[in-house]
Amino acid sequence: MAGKPQVVIAGAGFGGLWAAREFDKQPVEVLVLDRNNYHTFQPLLYQVAAAEVEPEAIAYPVRSTLSRSRNVHFLMDEMTGLNLEDKIIECRGREIFYDYLILALGSATNFLGVAGAAGHAFQLKTLEQGIALRNHILACFERSALEPDPERRRRALSFIIVGGGPTGVEFAGALHELIGGMLVHDYPLIDPREIRVVLLEACDSLLTGLPRKLQDYALQRLEKMGVEVYLGTAVSRVTPREVFCGEGVLIPTETVVWTAGVRGESPREGWGLPLSPGGRLPVEPTLQVTGYPGIYAIGDLAYLEEGRRPLAMMAPVATQQGTAAAQNILRKIHGAPENPFRYHNLGNMVTIGRNKAVASLLGRSFTGWTAWLIWLGVHLFNLIGFRNRLLVLINWSWDYFCFDRTVKLILPRDSREQPSPGRFVHCRKNSAENTAWPLNVLRIERKKRRGAA
Ligand SMILES: Cc1cc2nc3c(=O)[nH]c(=O)nc-3n(C[C@H](O)[C@H](O)[C@H](O)COP(=O)(O)OP(=O)(O)OC[C@H]3O[C@@H](n4cnc5c(N)ncnc54)[C@H](O)[C@@H]3O)c2cc1C
């Protein structure tokens, strides 16, 4: 057992979990490491922020996913550094030796250098950020209900979403439905005409990358719903009380949601590894980090071009790369040549609201009810855990048939205690009880490792 190669997978997102599954019952000892003890289903994160589903419904404990495996273990800790020479990962609580390393740390928000955005805009990358945004939106309504100053009221009731990609479009639609269909009834003292949902996009179309027909459909539907969409409008500055865009145009607001850019969740200075301009790790077609045998990068963190274009930061890319990287490591261990990664693109889909979505699948375009049903089915099927699927289905059904959202709670109770957007502090534990990996196999400490050598 002690002689088996040790594989460390940093990150238990889509890429990391799919890689871990591939190693089950194989002649390797695997440690999956994540700063959270759960996997987040990010494609439904915006529904947490729009009070559509409970946070628990889109998160799944990593230990439960791996509990049946005897050779794949989990450790809750945060990776903070990498010692390439000694093949050691540095974490908050310990150091971990690896023979093979898969980096699957995902991505972070890219504020594209816009002044004030990092400090004042809300992000939608983690469960905590989704909950913080939901609390903030509901708190804006609570405050506005009895606010006598019309200027303050209008500022609190203006919701600005920056970025017309899939997340921005989906959140704009969901937020408008939350407000128009539900909150307006709950807050009869608020004049609906004072509420604004604004979507700002720097390019001249929404959903770039999708066929023109689908882009136009999304734009028309959002505008028909009442979302104000401004194309070709770049944001230049964000403050706690307003957003500046275009040629000095100012919109008073307390809520700016930033969905405009992502970059690799790369360490500062890349931990000695090369970095692409988007903060991602350039990889060979085998998914090995260029110039570093034994180290692989997958998912949002990896930079790989196919047909001269970088692969998108999407869940199917991450899952397929997770499987491929694990298979290549096993092939290497068995002395077989590694296989180049090929992405099998089944399509893209984006929901806009009730009965409204766009889907581009296997070269065909779908809109409206058909696309919406496809979107529902695909997302339900891909959620991890039967309980989560059931919870989401119940929430969606309640929402659809009763025109109501079940999760309109401000938790924690005092919204003034909200962490400021962009600076949410995670609760991290470093206690020894998190260590599932048998200590005799782990060879945690450098000293031990050197002593054994
Ligand atoms: C709001 C939103 C909506 C999206 N919608 C869609 C969609 O509809 N369809 C689609 O295909 N894709 C969608 N995506 C993109 C998709 O979620 C990502 O492409 C996918 O999650 C990437 O998988 P990954 O494994 O690379 O990273 P992730 O799934 O992000 O996993 C990274 C993991 O690494 C952990 N981690 C990070 N840093 C550290 C560290 N230093 N130490 C320890 N652990 C660490 C994190 O906690 C996380 O668990 C969406 C993304 C977002 C944010």
Image (tube, helix red, strand yellow):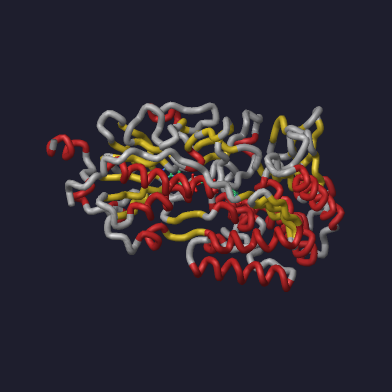
Q: Quadrant of the C terminus?
A: top left
Name which residue lies at 70% across and 45% down. 255
- From this view, report whether residue 312 is shown above or below residue 131: above
Front position in the image: 437 or 340? 340
Front position in the image: 313 or 223? 313
The answer to which image quadrant residue 212 occupies is top right
Left or right, 412 with respect to 403, comes to left
Name which residue lies at 50% across and 54% down. 40
**Image location (x, y in percent) of residue 308:** 57, 30
Left or right, 19 with respect to 342, comes to left
**Image location (x, y in percent) of residue 348:** 64, 49
Name which residue lies at 22% across and 53% down. 438
Front position in the image: 81 or 332? 332
**Image location (x, y in percent) of residue 107:** 52, 40
Name which residue lies at 41% across and 55% down. 37
The answer to which image quadrant residue 240 occupies is top right
- From this view, report whether residue 232 is shown above or below residue 381: above
Report if residue 257 is visible in the image: yes
